[in-house]
Amino acid sequence: MALPAPKEHIIQVLTHGALDLEGQFVAGSNSTFLGKITHKNETYPVVYKPVRGENPLWDFPTATLARREVAAYLVSEALGWELVPPSIFRKKKLPFGAGSLQYFVEHDPEYHYFSFSARDRERLRNAAAFDLLINNADRKGGHILVDDDGHIWLIDHGVCFHTDDKLRTVIWDFAGQPLPDDLRTDIVNLVPKLLEDGGLTTALGELLSRGEIAALGWRAHRLVKEAVFPAPDERRRSYPWPPV
């Protein structure tokens, strides 16, 4: 991985550092900023998504998208998949108030799902399984990054974890194929973490509702039981728009 320091160290910098904004991403529907965060003479690039910059959605609770970004990071880490860059939800000393801070991964924006090599497309099984688990309603091709070391990263998880089936993704490459044993084992190990008090459940409880955490556990149980990547549901829209 092309991280400049251990994840725990980056989290500390995100938590305590001073943020200077450098620009704004204008393509998305919510306010998203690129900046530099500095703590004890260490500076990292960061993406800042303030709660006050979120546009209300009819099907997601208001002012919850930044929290969902961080919940995705916690689930990725609990699985041991390291798919989501280090992320926190921070309430104080930010230019536009509380929001998510995520380490910005340097990458080639022209190299994404729709331009991936066949080899890199084959490496997306854990990404596909991850989106099934978190019920990702907006996995666009441009939300899948490859860093300089070839590590695959997933970003933009503001519309995930709904209790209803909302899955919309471009990654349907593995429909009908069996879930690899190693991924199945990781998901099996996740389930008790979602049922126990403390640890992951407590951390997710600050970001998601009880119903959303329970639905995450149910999706994990279903995926383990079926152990097959599903096909797109023809009864509803299963692809995001725009796809990139």
Image (cartoon, rainbow, N blue to C red):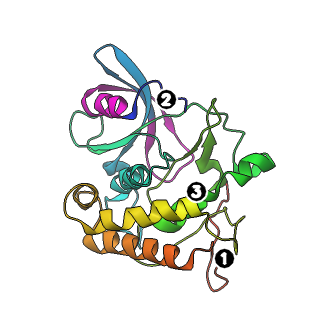
The residue at the point 68 percent across, 51 percent down is 123
When the figure is inspected, residue 127 is found, relative to residue 60, above or below; the finding is: above
Picture coordinates of residue 78, whole percent (x, y): 38, 53
As drawn, the residue found furthest toward the bottom would be: 235
Q: CA distance from mark 3 to mark 2?
A: 20 Å
Q: Nearer the viewer, residue 216 or 141?
A: 216
Residue linked to disc 2: 3
Q: CA distance from mark 2 to mark 1?
A: 34 Å
Query: Which of the 4 image quarters holds residue 90?
Result: top left
Residue linked to disc 1: 232
SS for callout 1: loop
Q: Which mark is residue 126?
A: 3
Q: Nearer the viewer, residue 55 or 144?
A: 144
Query: Which of the 4 image quarters holds residue 159?
Result: bottom left
| Left or right of residue 233, residue 67 in this image | left
Magenta-colored span: 8-33
Tell me the kind of residue under disc 3.
Answer: Asn
Q: Residues within 10 Å of mark 3 (few under 14, many from 20)?
A: some
Q: Residues within 10 Å of mark 1 (few under 14, many from 20)?
A: some
Picture coordinates of residue 31, whole percent (x, y): 43, 46
Q: Is residue 229 magenta?
A: no
Q: Earlier in the sequence, mark 3 or mark 2?
A: 2
